[in-house]
Image: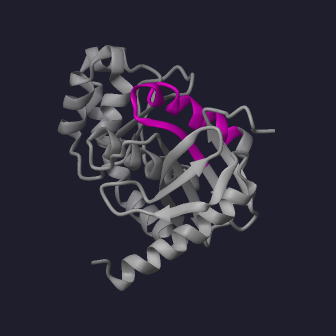
């Protein structure tokens, strides 16, 4: 039996999703939108011409975001410790030269991080690390591997929320017999001020190696305040 808290959350999810459906370039049948319970994704709906699709929703909220920023400030020392540690592992330093690591699981120790970097299979290292709480990105810089925990603002929250959902699908915590898509939206945060052209390229580069090996087929970012889709990957032919 659903609790009042669950009912309230599902009501809010449906309201956001109905708003998304109005501006989304996909022909979502409004009357088909329905809430689902775990382990299924949050929303099930019918897309004309595509069939039934499951959407897992995730929200970047102002209160939670500021709390996460405070946690980042407390982990600055971990970034410094990482640079010292990885410099001792020349094989890792060479393998991940130019890499940026975003730590989605703050409980990982420096030793555990180095072990995971060493264990990551070469043919699926980004997906392997993502499943274990480490988001890997190559920004094209010529520098030793860096653990990024500061000065990343809303970008970090976006990446973290998407990464958590991808990990849940990879581990079977979230599952469906239908295609799965992720819909991230904002609450109490001004997303319009972000440089979405730059953010889109950064997000796309981190998602490209992961989605082909995942049951998740698309990732969306929706700004309810502006009533606009800010990002979708892979792009749909109906965008534009």
Query: Does residue 145 lie above or below 59 as drawn?
Result: above
Q: Position of residue 84 (x, y in %)?
A: 29, 33
The location of residue 170, given as percent across then percent down, is: 31, 38
Give the residue at the far right of this rendering. Answer: 240
- Nearest the viewer among 185 and 217 is 217
Q: Is residue 232 left or right of residue 39?
A: right
Q: Which residues are magenta?
A: 198-220
In the picture shown, does residue 27 fall above or below 18?
Answer: above
User: Can residue 73 be seen by looking at this rendering?
Assistant: yes
Residue 206 within the magenta-colored segment of the rendering:
yes
Quarter assignment of residue 144 = top left
Task: Tell me if residue 171 comes above or below residue 211 in the rendering.
Answer: below
Residue 224, image x, y percentages: 68, 65
Quadrant location of the N terminus? bottom left
| Residue in the picture at 28% in, 28% down | 86
In the picture, the quarter occupied by the C terminus is top right
Q: How is the image coloured?
A: one colour
**Occupied quadrant, residue 215:** top left
* 214 or 200: nearer the viewer: 214
Vertical placement of residue 145 versus 70, above or below = above
Whole-percent x and y of residue 120? 26, 23
Residue at x 55% of width, y 42% of height: 51
Residue 150 shown in magenta: no
């Amino acid at each position: 039996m659903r609790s009042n808290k669950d009912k309230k959350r599902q009501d809010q999810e449906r309201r956001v999703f109905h708003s998304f459906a109005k501006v989304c370039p996909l022909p979502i049948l409004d009357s088909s939108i329905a809430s689902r319970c775990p382990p299924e994704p949050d929303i099930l709906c019918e897309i004309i011409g595509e069939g039934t699709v499951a959407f897992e929703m995730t929200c970047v909220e102002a209160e939670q975001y500021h709390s996460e920023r405070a946690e980042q400030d407390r982990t600055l020392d971990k970034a410094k410790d990482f640079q010292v540690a990885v410099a001792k592992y020349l094989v890792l330093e060479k393998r991940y030269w130019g890499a940026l690591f975003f730590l989605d699981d703050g409980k990982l120790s420096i030793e555990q991080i180095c072990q995971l970097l060493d264990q990551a299979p070469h043919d699926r290292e980004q997906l392997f690390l993502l499943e274990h709480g480490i988001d890997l990105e190559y920004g094209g810089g010529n520098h030793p591997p860096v653990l990024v925990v500061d000065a990343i603002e809303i970008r970090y929250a976006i990446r973290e929320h998407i990464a958590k959902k991808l990990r849940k699908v990879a581990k079977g915590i979230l599952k469906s017999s239908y295609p799965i898509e992720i819909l991230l939206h904002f609450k109490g945060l001004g997303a319009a001020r972000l440089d979405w052209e730059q953010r889109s390229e950064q997000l796309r580069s981190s998602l490209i190696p992961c989605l082909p090996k995942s049951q998740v087929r698309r990732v969306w970012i929706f700004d309810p305040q502006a009533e606009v889709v800010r990002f979708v990957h892979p792009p749909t032919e109906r965008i534009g």
